[in-house]
Amino acid sequence: MNEDIYAAQVRLIDEGGAMLGVMSSREALGIAQARGLDLIEIAPTATPPTCKIMDYGKWKYEKKKQ
């Protein structure tokens, strides 16, 4: 999550599910932070790893409610 993603490049999906493409992890983190959200690695074994922009706290809360 966020700064703990060490891959040089990631495939980025935005909060709406749209593919934003392959970019550096720093650039992806910058986009997530600009939107006030978190960068979450959802497929670490893919090449390049797939990350999604989302509100981690909200996601965690909703999973706990289920």
Image (tube, rainbow, N blue to C red):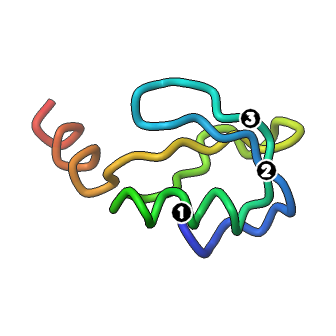
In which quadrant will I find the N terminus? bottom right
Residue carrying label 2: 23
Q: Amino acid at mark 2?
A: Met
Residue located at (86% from left, 63% from top): 8
Name the secondary structure under disc 1. loop
Q: Nearer the viewer, residue 24 or 52?
A: 24
Vertical relation: 16 (above or below) 54: above
Vertical relation: 52 (above or below) 66: below
Residue 29 location, x and y as percent? 59, 64
Q: Is residue 19 left or right of residue 15?
A: right
The answer to the question of whether label 3 and label 2 lie on touching residues, with beta carbons closer than 8 A, is yes
Vertical relation: 11 (above or below) 66: below
Asked where in the image residue 52 lies, by quadrant, the reply is top right
Q: Nearer the viewer, mark 2 or mark 1?
A: 2
Residue carrying label 1: 1
In which quadrant will I find the C terminus? top left
Asked where in the image residue 57 lies, by quadrant, the reply is bottom left
**Callout 1 environment at 10 Å: few (<14), some (14 to 19), or many (20+)?**
some
Q: Nearer the viewer, residue 21 or 46?
A: 21
Q: CA distance from mark 2 to mark 1?
A: 16 Å
Q: Is residue 62 left or right of residue 28?
A: left
Q: Amino acid at mark 3?
A: Gly
